[in-house]
Amino acid sequence: MKSNNVRPEDLQWRCEKCDRELVAGPVNVSYMGNHFTADLPHCPDCGRVLISERVAMGKMAEVEKLLEDK
């Protein structure tokens, strides 16, 4: 997954825990024992990640299906 996973409106969110603005950058993602890096909005302090509905229902759903079909 590339940086097209982050849209400007995603960075308008704030971390509920830290009250910090989210930043775009690489985060580690794992699913079914597979690990990869994706650029997603996340809190620079605690690392919580925002996965928008668009990404969850789009790119992430595609990756899940590919991994489950293996």
Image (cartoon, rainbow, N blue to C red):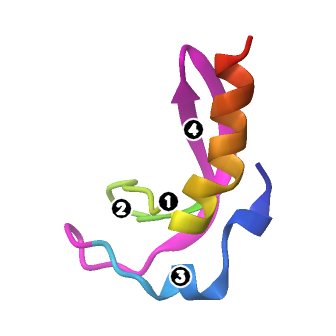
Of pointers 2 and 3, the one earlier in the residue sequence = 3
Mark 1 = which residue? 51
| Within-10-Å neighbours for mark 1: few <14, some 14–19, many 20+ | some
Give me the residue at 41% from left, 81% from top: 21
Disc 1 vs disc 2: which is toward the camera?
A: 1
Amino acid type of disc 3? Leu
Asked if residue 13 lies in the magenta stretch, the reply is no
Asked if residue 31 lies in the magenta stretch, the reply is yes
Disc 3 vs disc 1: which is toward the camera?
A: 1
Of pointers 3 and 1, the one earlier in the residue sequence = 3
Amino acid type of disc 2? Asp
The residue range painted magenta reads 16-39
Give me the residue at 56% from left, 54% from top: 56
Give yes or no for contact between labels 4 and 2 (Cβ–Cβ under 8 Å). Answer: no
Is label 4 in a helix, a strand or a loop? strand
Could you give the CA–CA distance between mark 1 and mark 4, rounded to whole angstroms?
13 Å
Could you give the CA–CA distance between mark 3 and mark 1, rounded to whole angstroms?
11 Å
Nearer to us in this view, 15 or 33: 33
Of pointers 4 and 2, the one earlier in the residue sequence = 4
Mark 3 = which residue? 11
Mark 2 = which residue? 45
Give yes or no for contact between labels 3 and 1 (Cβ–Cβ under 8 Å). Answer: no
Q: Which of the numbered marks, if any, corresponds to residue 28?
A: 4
**Hey, which quadrant is residue 14 in on the image?**
bottom left
Amino acid type of disc 1? Ile
Picture coordinates of residue 36, whole percent (x, y): 68, 31
Could you give the CA–CA distance between mark 1 and mark 2, rounded to whole angstroms?
17 Å
**Hey, which quadrant is residue 16 in on the image?**
bottom left
